[in-house]
């Protein structure tokens, strides 16, 4: 953790602070903590008054100096509701700070824990990259991989999935921690930066269901705040695998990542299982993909004025099979989408109402995407 924080501080002070917030609450969730301790520690962390309203109506408030405050609440700068009743809040003069949403989300997680009991398995954890690499390696001895799993707090008998995170020019470890730490998938989550990618190991004792829907919610709900953003992030999710065979899920996650599109509310996170036979396209050499005639045709379309917009319309239409649904997905009038599709048809000779041509177009789009991803 110290090494990661030093690296984050040099790259982005806000990101480094975000990791400190996550680490603070992770440590707190690993202990038995009552409402008083939670609010007092949060106020000290946020350096402003913090409060908690319990389901029975009782209120706990503390100032940043650790002193209890009377009354229900002062001027609330940000709050998160608790179910079935209650809330947590901060009282920061001059409006919320850049990390207040993150602090409140984690404070709410801690407040929801029954009796303040330990919940380490529910908290995302910034892991030692060397241990994560060891788990993902297919060359290391089984005994070494098993030991790494134990050190990471992962069960050797419970299937896990690997999530690969790409963040453009941003540090992958920073982005994986910040995005996943904001709203991590259910289960035990271990995160680290491996090479040019962020990695999350997700293990669930109640089954091996894919976390794709939860990860898409993170991307869709991004508010572009200064401390962290999901913009520019792509994620690939591997299939469920035995922990000692995590390398297989890692390979699938990287393959799925190549199909993902940054800033797309539907395809920013791709699931290898959901791709089915289409995932086999990732095995084709890049040179062959780039030389494929349909891919070259799409490149010519993209090079024209408004070409990328036309291809976005094509992708939405192929995905939905409906002109109106494609228009809704792109927030355009259906006549605008129809005009863009007509330009694609003129350039390619395809008739997109024909299922065969639409399937061909979808494959060409995937192949072009893979060729660009490298």
Image: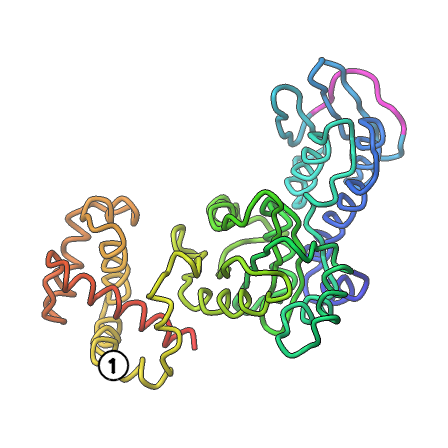
| Residue 263 drawn at (x, y percent) | 43, 56
Residue that appears at 33% across and 66% down: 278
Residue 260 within the magenta-colored segment of the rendering? no
| Residue 129 drawn at (x, y percent) | 71, 67
State the residue in front, 140 or 302: 140
Q: Is residue 220 above or below residue 291?
A: above
Residue 74 within the magenta-colored segment of the rendering? yes
Residue that appears at 55% across and 60% down: 241
Specify the quadrant that holds the C terminus.
bottom left
Q: Is residue 307 visible?
A: yes
Q: Is residue 131 above or below residue 269?
A: below
| Residue 304 drawn at (x, y percent) | 22, 72
Q: Is residue 235 visible?
A: no
Specify the quadrant that holds the N terminus.
bottom right
State the residue in front, 310 or 113: 113
Q: Is residue 266 left or right of residue 176?
A: left
Give the quadrant of residue 183.
top right
Q: Is residue 79 above or below residue 349?
A: above
Q: Is residue 191 left or right of residue 212?
A: right
Magenta span dominant secondary structure: loop
| Residue 272 drawn at (x, y percent) | 43, 61
Q: Is residue 205 left or right of residue 216?
A: right
Q: Furthest residue to the top?
A: 57
Figure colour scheme:
rainbow
Residue that appears at 10% across and 68% down: 346
Range shown magenta: 67-75
Figure disc tally: 1
Q: Which residue matches tag 1?
A: 292
Q: Is residue 37 above or below residue 197?
A: above
Query: Mark 1 falls on what kind of element?
Result: loop
State the residue in front, 76 or 162: 162
Q: Is residue 117 left or right of residue 178?
A: right
């Amino acid at each position: 953790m110290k090494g990661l924080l030093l690296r984050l501080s040099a790259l982005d002070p806000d990101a480094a602070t975000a990791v400190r917030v996550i680490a603070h609450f992770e440590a707190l969730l690993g202990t038995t903590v009552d409402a008083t301790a939670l609010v007092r520690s949060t106020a000290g962390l946020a350096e402003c008054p913090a409060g908690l309203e319990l389901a029975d109506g009782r209120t706990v408030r503390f100032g940043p100096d650790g002193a209890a405050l009377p009354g229900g609440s002062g001027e609330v700068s940000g709050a998160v509701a608790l179910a079935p009743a209650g809330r947590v809040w901060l009282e920061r003069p001059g409006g919320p700070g850049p990390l207040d949403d993150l602090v409140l989300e984690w404070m709410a997680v801690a407040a929801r824990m029954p009796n303040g009991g330990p919940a380490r398995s529910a908290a995302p954890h910034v892991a030692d990259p060397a241990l994560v690499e060891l788990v993902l390696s297919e060359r290391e001895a089984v005994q070494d991989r098993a030991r790494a799993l134990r050190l990471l707090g992962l069960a050797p008998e419970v299937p896990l999935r690997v999530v690969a995170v790409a963040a453009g020019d941003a540090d992958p470890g920073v982005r994986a921690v910040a995005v996943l730490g904001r709203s991590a998938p259910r289960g035990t989550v271990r995160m680290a930066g491996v090479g040019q990618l962020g990695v999350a190991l997700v293990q669930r004792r109640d089954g091996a269901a894919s976390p794709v829907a939860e990860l898409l919610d993170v991307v869709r709900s991004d508010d572009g705040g200064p401390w962290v953003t999901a913009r520019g992030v792509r994620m690939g999710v591997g299939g469920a695998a035995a922990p000692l065979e995590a390398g297989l899920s890692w390979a699938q996650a990287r393959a799925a990542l190549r199909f993902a599109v940054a800033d797309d509310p539907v395809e920013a996170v791709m699931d290898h299982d959901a791709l089915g036979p289409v995932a086999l396209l990732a095995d084709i050499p890049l040179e062959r993909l780039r030389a494929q005639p349909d891919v070259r045709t799409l490149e010519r379309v993209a090079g024209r004025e408004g070409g990328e917009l036309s291809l976005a319309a094509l992708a939405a239409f192929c995905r939905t099979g409906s002109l109106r649904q494609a228009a809704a997905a792109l927030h355009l009038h259906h006549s605008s989408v129809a005009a863009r599709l007509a330009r694609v048809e003129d350039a390619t000779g395809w008739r997109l109402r024909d299922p065969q041509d639409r399937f061909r177009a979808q494959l060409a789009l995937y192949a072009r995407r893979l060729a660009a991803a490298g």
